[in-house]
Image (tube, rainbow, N blue to C red):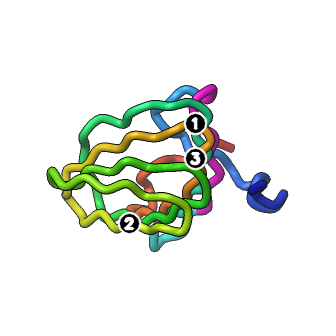
Amino acid sequence: MELPEFILGLPQADVPFDETMVKSHALSSKDGLLVFFEFLADFDVPAHSHGAQWGTVLEGEVGLTVDGVEKICRPGDSYSIPAGAVHSVRLTAGTKVIDFFEEPDRYTLKQ
């Protein structure tokens, strides 16, 4: 699934991953941060925590571990990570997700 041009035209989120591994397009408001992610390589996001996060898988597969409970999410699946929950993620190349973070400043936007 290709994202429409008006989404691809959104600013990139300044995420702590190499641009050869992930593309992002983000929309921020005072109420949260919405990020469209496309993962270009297989990789793992180490265990971490932050404010609440909700996401849905558009393509590919997301291996998610939240507070020690493992779950595999595939296209059409959604996930909810409570604020402060320790979680890690395993991503496969070609995966596309939409994530909403309750923290509007979770990532800054590149201009």
Q: Are marks 1 and 3 in contact (CB under 8 Å)?
A: yes
Q: Which residues are magenta?
A: 19-27
Which sits in the foreground, 35 or 96?
A: 96
Q: Secondary structure at mark 3?
A: loop
Residue 70: image x %, image y %? 25, 52
Q: Please name whichever residue, 52 or 42, is drawn nearer the observer in this view of the structure.
A: 42
* Image coords of residue 3 (percent x, y): 76, 57
Element type at marker 1? Answer: loop
Per the rendering, the mark at residue 79 is 2
Tell me how far mark 3 sits from mark 2, CA to CA: 15 Å
Do the CB atoms of the residues marked 1 and 2 lie less than 8 Å apart?
no
Furthest-right residue in this view: 5
The answer for how far apart the CA atoms under marks 1 and 2 are is: 19 Å
At x 81% / y 61%, what residue is drawn? 4
- Image disc number at residue 93: 1
In the picture of the structure, the residue carrying the numbered disc 3 is 95
Q: Amino acid at mark 3?
A: Thr
Name the kind of residue labelled 2 in the image: Tyr
Residue 12 location in percent, x, y?
Answer: 64, 45
**Nearer-N-terminus badge (3/2):** 2
Helix, strand or loop at label 2? It is: strand
Q: Is residue 21 magenta?
A: yes
